[in-house]
C-alpha cells in the first residue's frame, strides 16, 4: 500500500473528558525546550495534530498528548497537549489520563514522576489506589473583578487567571449548570470569551462558569475550551486557576481541600500551598481518576482526502 502512515495511540477519559496519548508515529520536533518544540508542532506539523484529534478519527472534545523526550533535566517524560484548534499550555485531565495510560503500558509504577510541558515541568503522583495527583505549574490571578459588557447578556463580572492556560472565571451572573443546558452555556461562554478578548485580554481562551454543587462538592463548573468544546471533566488547569482565586480572596487556606465538580458531576480534589504569597502565586495540586478506553493504530493514507482530519477551510 502506497504511503501508509501508522500512529499508535492509547485513549482514556478523565471524569468523562477524553485524552489520546500518541505513543509512536508522531513527528520529530527536534530537541530544546518544549516551549520551542510546541511552536514547531504548530508551524510545521499542524496537519498531524488535526489528523489525531479531529474528525473522522476524533472529535472536537478530544485532547491529544504527544509524548516527547523531556528537556528539563529532572523530568522522566515530556508531553505536548493539543486540541481541535491548536496546542494547549498544560492539561490537568490530560496529565491524569497520561499517567493512567503509562501505568497501563507498564511504563510507570505508583510514585511521583516529573513531566516536562511547554509551560514548565509538573509532577504527577500515581497513588496505589489508581488516583493521580498533579502538582501543576504555579498559578495566579492576573486581574480581579473585571467587568465586561457582553452583547445579549449585559454586564459580566469575572477574574482573569492563569492555571497553565488562561481563564476568565465568571462570578456573575450565574447560569443553571446542567447537562441539559449545555447549548446555552456554550453560547454564553463563547460570547463572554469574545468580549473578554476584545476588552484587553486576548490571551484568555478558556471561560469558566460556576454554580452550586450537585454531588457533595464545593462548587460545580462549566468550562468552555478554545475550540468551542466544553470540558466534560472539572478541568485541571481551570481548577488550578480557581484555587489561585480562592487563595487570593482568602476563601481557601493552604492545604484545605476544595472539591470541584464538573458539568457531568465528576470531580477533582484541589488544594494549594503558597509559592509566593506577596505575588499571589500558588502551587496547586489536583487529584482525579482516569480510565483507559482503547488501544489503537491510526492509519493515514495518501489517497484519503481527509487523511489530515477535517479542518475549517478543508471542505469544498
Ligand atoms: O484539564 O486542564 C484541563 C483541560 C484543559 C482543556 C481541557 N481540559
Image: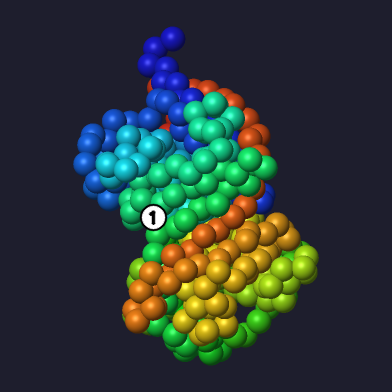
Quadrant of the drawing holding the C terminus: top left
Q: Nearer the viewer, residue 38 or 259?
A: 259
Residue lying at 42% horizontally and 17% vertically, measured from the top left:
4
Confirm or reject: label 1 Cβ below 8 Å from ligand 1.
no
Residue lying at 62% horizontally and 68% vertically, measured from the top left:
257
Residue 167 position, x and y percent, is 46, 70
Residue 278 in view here: yes
Q: How many marks?
A: 1
Q: Quadrant of residue 202?
A: bottom left
Check the image and name the residue furthest to the top: 1
* Above-or-below relation of 110 to 1: below
Q: Nearer the viewer, residue 111 or 53?
A: 111
Quadrant of the drawing holding the N terminus: top left
Q: Is residue 112 left or right of residue 295?
A: left
Residue lying at 39% horizontally and 12% vertically, measured from the top left:
2
At label 1, counting other C-alpha atoms closer than 10 Å, the crowd grade (few under 14, some 14-19, many 20 or more) is: some
* Above-or-below relation of 84 to 157: above
Residue 154 position, x and y percent, is 56, 89
Residue 197 in view here: no
Residue 102 position, x and y percent, is 52, 33
Colouring mode (rainbow / by chain / secondary structure / one colour): rainbow
Residue lying at 55% horizontally and 77% vertically, measured from the top left:
253
Q: Quadrant of residue 280?
A: bottom left
Residue 174 position, x and y percent, is 66, 81
Q: Dot 1: what SS?
A: loop
* Above-or-below relation of 80 to 194: above
Q: Is residue 152 left or right of residue 82?
A: right
Q: Nearer the viewer, residue 296 or 77?
A: 77
Quickly name the residue at label 1. 89
Amino acid at each position: 500500500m502506497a504511503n501508509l502512515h501508522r500512529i499508535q495511540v492509547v485513549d482514556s477519559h478523565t471524569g468523562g473528558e477524553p485524552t489520546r496519548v500518541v505513543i509512536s508515529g508522531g513527528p520529530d520536533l527536534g530537541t530544546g525546550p518544549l516551549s520551542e518544540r510546541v511552536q514547531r508542532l504548530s508551524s510545521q506539523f499542524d496537519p498531524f495534530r488535526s489528523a489525531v484529534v479531529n474528525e473522522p478519527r476524533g472529535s472536537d472534545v478530544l485532547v491529544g498528548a504527544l509524548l516527547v523526550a523531556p528537556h528539563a533535566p529532572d523530568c522522566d517524560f515530556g508531553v505536548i497537549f493539543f486540541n481541535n484548534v491548536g496546542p494547549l499550555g498544560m492539561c490537568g485531565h490530560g496529565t491524569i489520563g497520561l499517567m493512567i495510560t503509562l501505568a497501563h503500558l507498564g511504563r510507570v509504577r505508583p510514585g511521583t514522576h516529573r513531566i516536562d510541558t511547554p509551560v514548565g515541568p509538573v509532577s504527577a503522583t500515581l497513588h496505589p489506589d489508581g488516583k493521580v495527583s498533579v502538582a501543576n505549574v504555579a498559578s495566579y490571578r492576573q486581574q480581579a473583578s473585571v467587568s465586561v459588557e457582553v452583547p445579549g447578556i449585559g454586564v459580566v463580572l469575572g477574574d482573569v487567571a492563569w492555571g497553565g492556560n488562561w481563564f476568565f472565571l465568571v462570578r456573575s451572573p450565574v447560569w443553571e449548570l446542567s447537562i441539559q443546558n449545555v447549548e446555552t452555556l456554550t453560547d454564553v461562554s463563547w460570547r463572554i470569551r469574545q468580549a473578554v478578548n476584545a476588552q484587553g485580554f486576548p490571551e484568555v481562551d478558556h471561560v469558566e462558569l460556576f454554580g452550586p454543587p450537585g454531588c457533595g462538592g464545593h462548587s460545580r463548573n462549566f468550562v468552555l475550551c478554545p475550540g468551542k468544546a466544553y470540558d466534560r471533566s472539572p478541568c485541571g488547569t481551570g481548577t488550578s486557576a480557581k484555587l489561585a482565586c480562592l487563595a487570593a480572596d482568602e476563601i481557601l487556606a493552604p492545604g484545605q481541600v476544595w472539591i470541584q465538580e464538573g458539568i457531568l458531576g465528576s470531580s477533582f480534589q484541589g488544594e494549594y500551598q503558597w509559592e509566593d504569597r506577596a505575588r499571589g502565586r500558588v502551587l496547586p495540586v489536583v487529584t482525579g481518576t482516569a480510565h483507559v478506553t482503547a488501544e489503537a493504530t491510526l492509519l493515514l493514507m495518501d489517497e484519503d482526502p481527509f487523511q489530515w482530519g477535517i479542518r475549517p477551510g478543508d471542505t469544498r
